[in-house]
Structures are given as structure tokens and as C-alpha cells.
């Protein structure tokens, strides 16, 4: 009986040992999905900035959301975040006012949003690109451009900064 018990234990040990020596099976790769708001890495924020600056000069078009069709301000933001960081943003300025986390002006980094307001309502938005500047699609007949937050018109506008 002791012999058969030892034989059984030895057999089980060999089966377990054989299982340990087999090649490991890799887990399936996770599906790539857009990141939720508020989770941009510094690298992604820099990619957002580079892409936004690269779109300076693209024509403005109300409702536009591609370089080929032109951009309005929220269309520019949606396009840049989706293409450079796989992040889906709200498609209207009204949706951008509460998107991501509120950031104090002294904590701004590239890739953050500047959302301009009047009477508590979002009216315009752009992408902060550093050194007090932002990229935005300002108005009919214009083009996507780089402006200073401290320049005449923009310095007078109430602004909320958001980190997607």
C-alpha cells in the first residue's frame, strides 16, 4: 500500500512538473480603447500640443471637425485629442466647461484647455500650448491660430482651465 501511495504521489509530482515546464501561454492583448478624460500622460499632452500647433492656418468653419473641412473651436479640440491621444472630448463648448479637472492658472501644462465663459456659459475654447499661448479656431473668415492669453481681447475674457 505504501508503495502504491508513493507511486501515485510520484506520478502526480511528475504531472505537475511537466505542466510547469511547458511554454507559458500569453494572455490576449487588451483591446485599445480611448482613454477616459483626466488621464492624459505628459507625453500625450505634448502630442496634443504638437498636433494643435501643426493645424495653425487651417480655415475656420462653423461645425467643422477635420483639416479638410475646417474647424470650429470644439471641432479642433475633438479632432486633436482623438487623433493624438485617443481621447474623446465633448463636441460642444458647453460640454467642455465641465470636462476633465479644473486647473489653477499657475498649474497649467501643455495640452490643457482654456474655456472662455460669459455669464457662466462656455463661449469659446482652445488648447494651451505653453508660455501663456493657446491654439484655437476663432471665427468665421479666420483660421486656426496661436494667440496669447494675455493679449488685449483674451486677457479681458473670463477663462476656466481644464485638464482632460
Image (cartoon, rainbow, N blue to C red):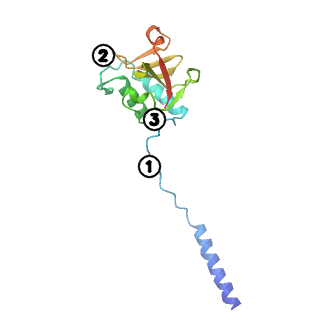
- Front residue of 38/67: it is 38
Residue at image x 39%, y 27%? Answer: 94
- Residue 19 x, y percent position in the rendering: 58, 70
Residue 119: mark in rendering: none
- Front residue of 140/156: it is 156
Q: How far is the residue under mark 3 from the one under mark 1?
A: 15 Å
Residue at image x 46%, y 19%? Answer: 134
Q: Quadrant of residue 154?
A: top left
Locate the N terminus by quadrant: bottom right
Q: How far is the residue under mark 1 from the one under mark 2?
A: 40 Å
Q: Quadrant of residue 72?
A: top left
For residue 106, side relative to residue 90 (left or right): right
Q: Is residue 133 above or below residue 81?
A: above
- Front residue of 116/119: it is 119
Residue for badge 2: 140
Residue for badge 3: 85
- Residue 164 x, y percent position in the rendering: 49, 32
Disc 2 is placed on an element classified as loop
- Front residue of 86/139: it is 139
Residue farthest toward the top in the current orientation of the protein: 152
Sort mark 1 into few (<14), some (14-19) or many (20+) by Cα contacts within 10 Å. few
Q: Do the residues bearing badges 3 and 1 touch, measured as CB atoms within 8 Å? A: no
Amino acid at each position: 500500500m505504501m508503495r502504491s501511495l508513493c507511486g501515485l504521489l510520484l506520478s502526480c509530482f511528475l504531472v505537475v512538473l511537466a505542466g510547469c515546464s511547458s511554454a507559458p501561454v500569453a494572455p490576449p492583448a487588451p483591446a485599445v480603447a480611448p482613454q477616459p478624460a483626466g488621464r492624459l500622460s505628459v507625453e500625450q499632452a505634448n502630442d496634443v500640443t504638437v498636433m494643435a500647433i501643426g493645424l495653425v492656418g487651417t480655415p475656420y468653419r462653423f461645425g467643422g471637425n477635420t483639416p479638410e473641412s475646417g474647424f470650429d473651436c470644439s471641432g479642433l479640440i475633438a479632432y486633436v485629442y482623438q487623433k493624438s491621444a485617443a481621447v474623446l472630448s465633448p463636441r460642444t463648448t458647453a460640454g467642455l466647461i465641465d470636462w476633465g479637472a479644473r486647473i489653477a492658472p499657475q498649474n497649467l501644462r501643455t495640452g490643457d484647455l482654456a474655456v472662455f465663459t460669459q455669464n457662466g456659459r462656455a463661449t469659446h475654447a482652445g488648447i494651451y500650448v505653453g508660455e501663456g499661448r493657446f491654439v484655437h479656431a476663432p471665427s468665421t473668415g479666420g483660421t486656426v491660430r496661436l494667440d496669447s492669453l494675455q493679449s488685449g481681447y483674451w486677457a479681458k475674457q473670463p477663462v476656466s482651465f481644464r485638464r482632460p
